[in-house]
Amino acid sequence: MFDEKSQKKPEKKPEKKPDITFFHPDLLEVPADGGKPYLKGYRCTSCGQLDFPKLSPCPNCWGEEFEVVPLSRRGTLYSFSDNYIGQAGMKPPYSFGYIDLPENLRIFAQLEGGPKTFSCDEAVELTVGPVRDNRDGVPLISYKFRKVED
Amino acid sequence: MKFQRNVYIAGVGETRFGRHNVDFDVLGRSAALEALRASNINRPDMVQSAYVGNGTNGLVTGQTVLKNLGMCGKLPIINVESACSAGGMAVHLAVRDVAMGLAEVAIGIGCENHTLHMAQGTAFATAMSDIETVHGAVMTGKYAMRAQRYMYETGATAEDLAMITVKNRRHATNNPFAWFKGEISIEEVVNSRVVASPLTLQQCCGIADGAGAVVVCSEEMVKKLGIEKPIRVAGSVVRSGPYHNRPRDITGDDITEESAAQLYLESGIGPENVDIVELHDAFTIAELLYYECLGLCPKGDGLKFLRDGQATHGGKCVVSPRGGMLSYGHPIGASGAAQIAASVKQMRNQCPGYQVDPVPRVAMTHVTGGGLSGTEHAACTMHMLISNW
């Protein structure tokens, strides 16, 4: 006779706390009061250089104190590509592009809206959504851009 | 780099590029042995330093390559990684050792096996520590953005870009070391499946395996080894990519422009004197942009340079005479060394069926490396070679 117990599947391991699901609070602010999300720029208080993402020390003067500057939510799509072969672990097609902000910063980000819908120099705005699955298979939330809705 | 004395290439080796079922070390050893034998070196204790370029195959790759040649224990072996620039950088370091008097004979090797190790149907990404990689960046898409912007600004078409593949595959037709070669039509290139818009499959280099090796030595050793056709290394440049997160013109390439300017200055040779170039044609758009970045034609004239036949046999400068990465495929740590090996063979009139005529006297090579956010490329390695006999 076999021991029925031993045939049972091993008990499920205790639920592991998922790996991060929000990419980086230093970079993206999603106000709890329902206000619009924004990217956080960092202005070096000693030389004035503004950077995104946060670089510490400041690559210009090695200063270590920064003032957080909310960046413009709208920018211009400098260039983009619809990717039909993607990174291992990501589901194509997905689109990404370079977005130039009025603060003279260029942001690399995924684009929301589907392939064959973008063109160079069009206006885009910040949004928030899943960019990939993290190591636990849970969507990782970060900044994205989409066409400005009129 | 200011050379303290002249440096010569004694011998070179390269494997066939493509899918190999042997690993990077076997490929590297094969190219190295060919380069050593071509340098009239027939025993393991004559080389004084070795640099081995590899991108993805793990740790102590150089020692793994050279141990079976009996070289371990007889010389320092230094492993070099800078993504696609690794092989070129390995040769640069060998050149540097001889130029500075640290070695009389040194070897630079580039080797890589991707196909035994990489998941099918995926594209190259950079390190997950990079903010762009987390957001989905792949090298195909990053080059595609350059193509997208170039086409937007200049009105260039998909057919224009396709001409690069057609040209390079034609160059490679009779090259036994190339993988994808021979006739292909513009329509076939344009209508192949889209990998990263606007780039189609036939505009992207294949994920391949292979190796190249270059033995360099001093003038005295050229005589001692009895090298009949020494190639002088007139310049060897390595630069890192300028870093900033501000808008930049990606239809140019700051690191390539700076590297070329430095190479021309240090070698005393201008772009108008270069007979052949192997450049980083990982994607069609790259070759087109680099005509301009390398000063082979004025800024904005890249398409005209191509259409006028200036980049092929009979033109001002034969670009990618071996067929380039678009024909060889691109084992990232190998390509830089293999470009130099192929160029030396052209200068020695050793390329039956794909020989440039007249036999080139001045050759230039160029590999960039790495997709690092805030830079166009993390690294760039360039060489200028002259035949002296």
Image (cartoon, coloured by chain):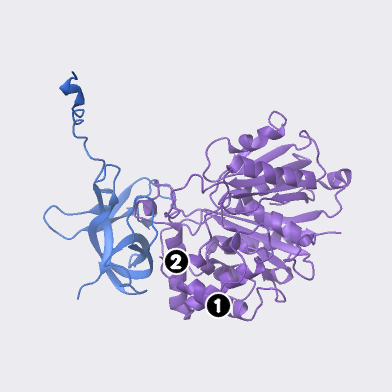
Q: Residues within 10 Å of mark 1 (few under 14, many from 20)?
A: some
Residue, disc 1: B300
**Depicted A150 relative to depicted B254: above or below:** below
Protein chain holding label 2: B
Quadrant of residue B341 within the rendered picture? bottom right
Which residue is farthest top?
A1
Q: Is residue B155 visible?
A: yes
For the residues tagged 2 and 1, is the chain the same?
yes
Amino acid type shown at disc 1 = Gly
Crowding at dot 2, Cα within 10 Å, few <14 / some 14-19 / many 20+, comes out as many
Image position, residue B281 (x, y; %): 57, 63
Identify which amino acid the numbered label 2 is placed on: Ala
Residue at the spot 12% in from the left edge and 57% down from the top edge: A34
Examine the rendered structure and indicate whether residue B25 appears above or below residue B333: above
Dot placed on the residue nearer the N-terminal end, 2 or 1: 2
Task: Nearest to the eye among marks 2 and 1: give it.
Answer: 2
Foreground residue, B146 or B40? Answer: B40
- Camera-nearest residue between A98 and B335: B335
What colour is chain B?
purple
* Residue A107 percent across, percent down from the top left: 35, 61
Chain identifier matching the blue colour in the rendered picture: A
* Label 2 secondary element: helix
Q: Is residue A139 left or right of residue B273?
A: left
Return the chain for callout 1: B
From this view, report whether residue B184 is shown above or below residue A84: below
**Can residue B280 be seen by looking at this rendering?**
no
Q: Secondary structure at mark 1?
A: loop
Image mark for residue B11: none
Task: Residue at 47%, 47% (x, y): give it.
Answer: B118
